[in-house]
Image: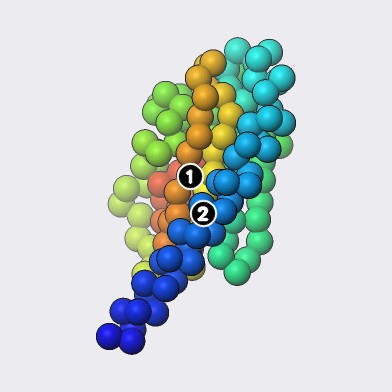
Amino acid sequence: MLRREKVMMKAVGALALSGALLAVAAPALARSGAPEAARAPGANLRILISVKDGGTQEARLTCRPAGGDHRSPRRACELLRQVDGEPGELDVHPQAVCTREYRPVSVVVTGKWRGRSVSFGRVYSNACLMKAAGGAVFTL
């Protein structure tokens, strides 16, 4: 029973981290990109990735034209086009083999996709599962 309680406490901690990250970051990120989103015909997104007990990374991604300070803007835009700008629909590597390591990673994506607001947040059990889902979109 003790093992189960530890796992539950870790899960609660990861969810709390994600909720706090969304609550604090999403409004600020949405405000910071608002003027650019109005001018950009494609997309203007902020992607924030945070590892529990680790660091946080942030990148800006624009599409049409692909750019921003994201590591792979063209590939990320291509992947998002396939799911009409819905990061939660991404499943880039469904056959990925990942360990069962538990090191939660929170992903927050906010901004505009073709004039529509995007607000996405999810906690993945580890970085491998996050990258399997989001591919280049979640590779900062």
Give the residue type at disc 2: Ser
Q: Quadrant of the N terminus?
A: bottom left
> Can the viewer see residue 128 in this picture?
no
On the image, the x and y values in percent for residue 25 come to: 63, 44
Q: Is 64 positioned to the left or the right of 93 in the image?
A: right
Mark before the other along the chain sequence, 1 or 2: 2
The alpha-carbon separation of the residues under discs 1 and 2 comes to 7 Å
User: Is disc 1 surrounded by few (<14), some (14 to 19) or many (20+) residues within 10 Å?
Assistant: many
Relative height, residue 103 to residue 81 (above, below): below
Give the residue type at disc 1: Gly
Residue 63: mark: none
On the image, the x and y values in percent for residue 15 come to: 46, 59
Q: Which residue is mark 2?
A: 18
Dot 2 falls on a residue whose secondary structure is helix
Q: Which residue is mark 1?
A: 121
Q: Give the camera-side residue of 19 and 114.
A: 19
On the image, the x and y values in percent for residue 22 come to: 55, 46
Q: Are marks 1 and 2 in contact (CB under 8 Å)?
A: yes
Residue visible at 45% across and 49% down in the picture? 122
Relative height, residue 34 to residue 93 (above, below): above
Residue visible at 58% across and 51% down in the picture? 21
User: Is disc 2 surrounded by few (<14), some (14 to 19) or many (20+) residues within 10 Å?
Assistant: many
